[in-house]
Image (spheres, helix red, strand yellow):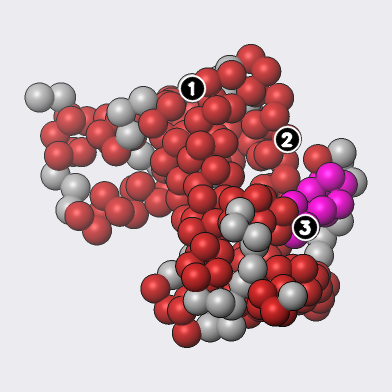
Amino acid sequence: MSRQSSTAAQLTPSQLLSARARILEAAAEMFRTHGYDVSMDVIATAANVSKQTLYNQFGSKEDLFKAMIADRAAVMRAPLNASALERHPRDMLADIARQYYQHACGEHEIGYYRMMIGASQQFPDIGRAYYEAGPKQMVEALAQWMAREERLGRLDTGGDPVMAAEHYLSLVAGQVEARGLLGLWTEMSPAEMERRARFCADIFMRAFGPHRLMG
C-alpha cells in the first residue's frame, strides 16, 4: 500500500467529514474559477488533501460535482423539513426565498452559475447532472410540500403543485438572477432580502391561498 493510501485509510470519521467539507468548498471555487475541466489534482491541492483521499471520498470528478450540487440543493431545501406542518405557508415560503437570496445570489454563487451555463455547452451531461441534482430536486421538494398543504386546505394550486412550485421559484429569482448572469450583480442587504422574501410570499399567497377554495 502506498503512503497516500495508508494515510487516507487511517483518517478518523471526524477527519473524513472535515476533509469532505474542505473538498466540496475547494471544488466549488475551482469549478467557478477554472471551469469544469479543472483537474482533480488542482482540487486536491486547493482542499489540502491527498489525491487518494479525494478519490476515496468521491470516485470521479463527475461524482464530486454531483455531490457538491446535491449539498447546495439540500441547503436550499432546508426549510421544507418535518416541522413545516406547524408553520403558516406564508412563513415557509418566505424562508425558502431567504435561503435563495442568502445561498444562491452571492457574487461567487452567480459566478458559479454562469460557469455552469458555459460548461453545459461543452459538457451537456454535466448540465443535465446539475439540473437533476439541484433545481429539479428543489422543484420536486417544494411541489410535494405544496401538495400536502393543498390537501390540508391551506393552499390551492388548482391541482398542479409542480407548476405552482416552478412559478414560485421563478418569482423569487426574478430579475435578481438575470442581472447577476449578465454581470450586473450588486450585493443585497439583509433588509432587502427580507423585503423581497416577504413580497414573494405575500404575492404567492394572494394567488394560491385558501381563499381560492371558497370561490
Task: Give the number of marks.
Answer: 3
| Residue type marked 2 | Arg
Q: Is 16 situated left or right of 200 in this image? A: left
Say if 21 sits above or below 31 in the image: below
**SS at mark 2 in the image:** helix
Residue 54 highlighted magenta (yes or no): no
Residue at position x 65%, y 60% from top? 158
Residue 200 at x, y percent in the picture: 77, 68
Helix, strand or loop under label 3 = helix
Q: Which residue is mark 2?
A: 114
Q: Quadrant of the C terminus?
A: bottom right
Image quadrant in which the N terminus is located: top left
Residue at disc 1, secondary structure: loop
Looking at the picture, which amino acid does disc 3 mark?
Answer: Leu
Q: Earlier in the sequence, mark 1 or mark 2?
A: 1
In-front residue for pair 85/57: 85
Q: Main secondary structure of the magenta part?
A: helix
Kindly report which numbered mark, 1 or 2, lies closer to the viewer in this rendering: 2
| Span colored in magenta | 169-180
Residue 12 on image: x %, y %: 17, 53
Disc 1 marks a residue whose amino acid type is Ser
